[in-house]
Image: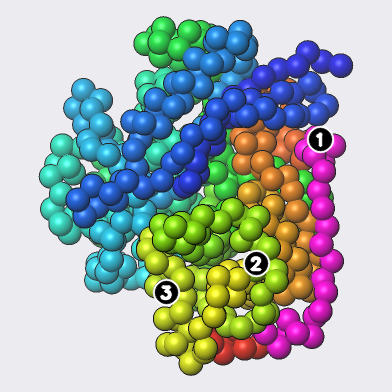
Amino acid sequence: MAETQKFLAFDLGAESGRAVLGHFDGERIKLEELHRFPNGGIRILDSLHWDVLRLWSEMKHALSTCAQKGIELKGIGIDTWGVDFALIGKDDTLLGLPYHYRDSRTDGMLEQAFHHCSREKIFERSGGQFLQINTLYQLLSMVVNKSPLLEVAETFLMIPDLFNFWLTGRKVCEFTDATTTQFYDPGQKNWSKEICDALHLPFDILPEIVQPGTQLGSLLPSVAQETGLTDVSVIAPGCHDTASAVAAVPAKGENWAYISSGTWSLMGIETPRPIITDTALELNFTNEGGINDTFRFLKNIMGLWLVQECRRTWARAGDELSYNQIAQIAAEAKPFSALVDPDDNAFLSAGNMPLRIGEYCKRTGQVPPENKGEIVRCALESLALKYRWVWEKLQTVWDKPINVIHIVGGGSRNRLLCQFTADATGVPVVTGPTEATAIGNVMVQAIAVGLIDSISDAREIIRESFEVETYEPQDSDRWEEAYDRFLTVTGLS
């Protein structure tokens, strides 16, 4: 057996960040969580931001822990959420705290964009899904509001690229995260100057794009001195967390779809090239970069955000419920009491989610859920039915049948949602590994340093290293009736 190599994966999500140590002995991988820290938006006056300075401090704490424990790292990789960015000014100064994608500054920006560049042209050039949270509309809001930051910005960096810059001094954007901006052109394999010029976005601040698996360099001397780590290579994995998660899907063949399940659900297929067609535009699907020149053709779905916001609302009112308690009351609640479209704009921002779900039901002629259990069950059943809709639409643009759905990420722990997904779609659902994002991050690092030959080999290693669980469809007649009702209520028919 080969000597065990250790890789550090920083996995930053919307609710928390983690430093995870990956141990790879050449045949199997195992994970060890070294450090976990909270994350989330911070409100300053009327704006929502990310506290990247605190996150940076937490990351350096994890690096110091490795040094103190005498852990010799083969590589360090960072993945985060997409779309958000930082601006760097003269002398490498951070120009303010990056905005959170749920900030209201993008309200109305899609309509503003279409005054300058048609929806069809934007999709033709980017293949990107139209969401007001996209980087494109965040930058456009700065242009429209004449932000002084754009006048002094010298470099644009996505969130993982910012941390890579602070680690190594190298200012580049990693491919998978760049494709979440909606101004990356997959045909040109570069930023779209046509879109940027049409919307008057600053093109000259956009840096070089590098592929996942690129070795960015060693730690800066200042970081090495502060943390006690030396001679460690920083490697760009799939820096968009979904890219890393999909890299860890333990699938075989081609007849499968995935759901990377967490605050957001990203559901799609892995393809060798982007799918940029009239049908894809009409369905508002997106093409995001994957590992080894692949693309992830997918739909962003609101995910467990609705449940998370309900939990926060109840906690503020003094009723602290664990996720296990929430799952239990949902399992015991009346089924199909009401249905919602999880992607309705009413649910996008933080706030009183139980109230918003009730208001949606009234607006669509339904009786609102009567208690906490029915509210959560409504959210989970509606999410599973939205998966069904996306699953059907995927098969209109993909020439292969989708016979199984793999769910990875934290949402795979929600057994009720996993069973609902199998019931709603009528196909088996395979769940796990839960820590797919960190696993994919580590595997791409291992490929980068030559320990693994390919993603297919990495997936075989993952299958040997982690257990999965299969959910078979049940109660299909009731779910068919519910799906018909869901289509009517949401207007998706």
The answer to if 468 sits in the magenta stretch is yes
**Residue 33 in sight here:** yes
Judged left or right of residue 43, residue 313 is: right
Q: Are marks 1 and 2 in contact (CB under 8 Å)?
A: no
Judged left or right of residue 251, residue 204 is: left
The tag on residue 329 is 2
Could you tell me the amino acid type at mark 3? Arg
Q: Which residue is mark 3?
A: 356
Q: Is residue 194 above or below residue 28?
A: below
Q: Residues within 10 Å of mark 3 (few under 14, many from 20)?
A: some
Q: Position of residue 368 (x, y in %)?
A: 51, 83
Tell me the element at label 3: helix
Q: Earlier in the sequence, mark 1 or mark 2?
A: 2
Q: Which residue is mark 1?
A: 465
Q: Of tags 2 and 3, which is closer to the observer? A: 2
Judged left or right of residue 74, residue 194 is: left
- Kindly identify the residue that appears in the image at 52 percent across and 88 percent down: 367
Q: Which residues are magenta?
A: 461-483
- Kindly identify the residue that appears in the image at 36 percent across and 57 percent down: 102
